[in-house]
Amino acid sequence: KAGVTQTPRYLIKTRGQQVTLSCSPISGHRSVSWYQQTPGQGLQFLFEYFSETQRNKGNFPGRFSGRQFSNSRSEMNVSTLELGDSALYLCASSEDVGNTIYFGEGSWLTVV
Amino acid sequence: AQSVTQLGSHVSVSEGALVLLRCNYSSSVPPYLFWYVQYPNQGLQLLLKYTSAATLVKGINGFEAEFKKSETSFHLTKPSAHMSDAAEYFCAVSPGGGADGLTFGKGTHLIIQP
């Protein structure tokens, strides 16, 4: 069974631009969540989607958004990029709450 | 609200020695607790998780952790360290099992001395 796949793995953007990251969950998993990892703040929960609905949300500004498609694939978008958005963005999937969560290898975003 | 404290941002042990990584948590409800490992330039891999079935939880690669409610701790141990154990280790807590959002500790970098 393929794991959680994230694309792109590495990208560089300029301040003020927007970025879209993609995540394909493990087959059969309907819950997809996103995390931001930075050296200063560590790992922080962004949001979680289940069956195309956002069920849980972390404490991030509205510039951070996401969506989930009917095939459970998910995208997250960051608008008006700031230097502080430079981070590793991790996607994770599970069958549902209470089930094991599996992480992808992440997308490295650098904002210059 | 929940939080996780990992004591020691860096822990160094000799190969073959006991590994002990400390994690204390706070949670307003009975928690789910997790340990994840992250190797350089990779995502997170689940080592083990506590879901109230048993206080001593065995995970992969010879790791185990014991849930102690009275001490609000969930320390990770391994009897004999191997060079391949060198990595970043994260303790995490969730009130609802994880998909509702994991709260992570700051991480502990494990260094293995030859």
Image (tube, grey):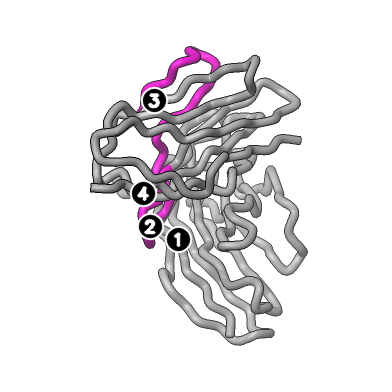
What separation in Å lies between label 1 and label 3 (alpha carbons)? 26 Å
Residue hosting label 2: B42
Tell me the amino acid under the disc marked 1.
Gly
Residue hosting label 1: A106
Tell me the amino acid under the disc marked 3.
Glu
Bounds of the magenta segment: B37-59
Disc 2 or 3, which lies upstream in sequence?
Answer: 2
At mark 1, the secondary structure is: loop
Tell me the amino acid under the disc marked 4.
Ile
- The answer to which image quadrant residue A8 occupies is bottom left
Depth order, front residue of B43/B56: B56
Q: Where residue B5 sits in the image (x, y, percent)? A: 62, 39
What separation in Å lies between label 4 and label 1 (alpha carbons)? 23 Å
What separation in Å lies between label 2 and label 3 (alpha carbons)? 22 Å
Image: A52 above or below A38:
above
Q: Which mark is residue A90?
A: none
Residue hosting label 4: B111
Mark 1 and mark 2 residues within 8 Å of each other at the beta carbon: yes
- Name the front one of labels 1 and 2: 2
Q: Where residue B42 sits in the image (x, y, percent)? A: 38, 57
What separation in Å lies between label 2 and label 4 (alpha carbons)? 17 Å
Image: B103 above or below B32:
below
Disc 4 or 3, which lies upstream in sequence?
Answer: 3
Left or right: where A46 falls relative to B89: right
Chain name for mark 3: B
Q: Assess whether residue A35 is covered by the magenta stretch.
A: no
Left or right: where B59 falls relative to A20: left
Q: Which mark is residue B64?
A: 3
What separation in Å lies between label 4 and label 3 (alpha carbons)? 18 Å
- Mark 1 and mark 3 on one chain: no
Q: Answer yes or no: is residue A26 visible.
A: no
